[in-house]
Image (cartoon, grey):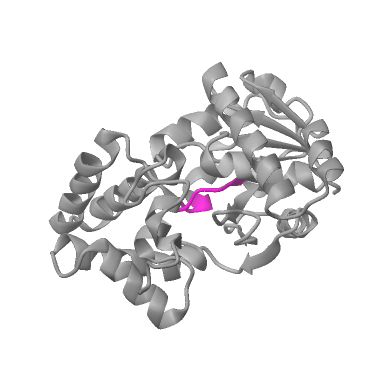
Amino acid sequence: MEIKKFTVFGGGVLGSQVSWQAALHGVKTTVYDISDEAIEACKTKHQAYAQMFTKDFGIPEEQVKRAFDFLSYTTDLEQAVADADLTSESIPEDFEIKKEFYQKLSTLLPEKTILTTNSSTLLPSMLAPFTGRPEKFLALHFANPVWAANIGEVMGHKDTDPQVFDTVVEFARRIGLVPIPIHKEQPGYVLNTLLIPFLEAAQTLYFNGVADYKSIDKTWMISTGAKVGPFGIIDLVGMNTVYNVLMLRYKQTGNKTILERAQKIKEQFIDKGKLGVATGEGFYKYPNPEYQSPGFLK
């Protein structure tokens, strides 16, 4: 099956990147979000990406302008999926919100449409019963930023049609990603199975008062040659996602230390509007975080 029309649900940090990446590679892409304000915010992000790709990445201006010819935006869910071949869902990382969304979506979809979730924490099998088409439902998980960390983790569940799985793998390749086929359901896929314990270790050092966040980042960056440390990564991922992951872990384990950490993230960052890169401040201030300055590692 050739993917000609692609719909992205949610135009936030990752949804805006996913839709831009697809449009830049010549795929007709529709962004759906729940309000005009959210749509305008996504459009603003796309304009910023266009400038970045032209000025920083050296992509020809004509190619970047052409991406906008492949982009459309709507707050009408039925219109968004009217002729979609493939969808990607990047709505808030909350089971009940996703469940209700898929139940509503299932009544509007054309028969041909393949559904994918970009969920970082929920397995496809958890959401598949609410889609109305479990054989055409799986995960296509993107890293952040999509164009630099350009992997596409493809993970089905026991009822996913193998041909559908292969179609999504090829779509990932078509839009400039390196497909990572995952052969059985794994919480966190490959990337987050590696990343989450790393970020949790950094948080343990910080919240237990062992070291300040800059020292922790410096240690990692100097010792490994990485361009960013764990707290820079947390800012990139976003505090809401970090909070939701912690709350999910708490519900799974009952570990009160995890709950306390989630509450600190909420009180010290989310409640103050410090959501990370998306809002210009998290642990660091953006667009010029201190860890990128020449003297940071000295």
List x then y, in percent, for residue 22. Answer: 74, 45
Viewer-nearest residue: 177 or 275 = 275
Q: Which residues are magenta?
A: 116-125
Q: Is residue 2 magenta?
A: no
The correct choice, above or below, for 290 with respect to 267 in the image is below
Viewer-nearest residue: 60 or 79 = 60
List x then y, in percent, for residue 69. Answer: 83, 32
Direction from residue 270 to residue 46 in the image, left or right: right
List x then y, in percent, for residue 216. Answer: 28, 69
Image quadrant assignment for residue 82: top right
Look at 32% across and 76% down and name the residue there.
219
Look at 64% across and 45% down and name the residue there.
18
Look at 37% across and 64% down and name the residue there.
230
Q: Is residue 32 visible?
A: yes
Look at 54% across and 40% down and name the residue there.
90
Q: Is residue 124 magenta?
A: yes
Direction from residue 173 to residue 180 in the image, left or right: left
The correct choice, above or below, for 279 with respect to 189 in the image is above
Image quadrant assignment for residue 149: bottom right
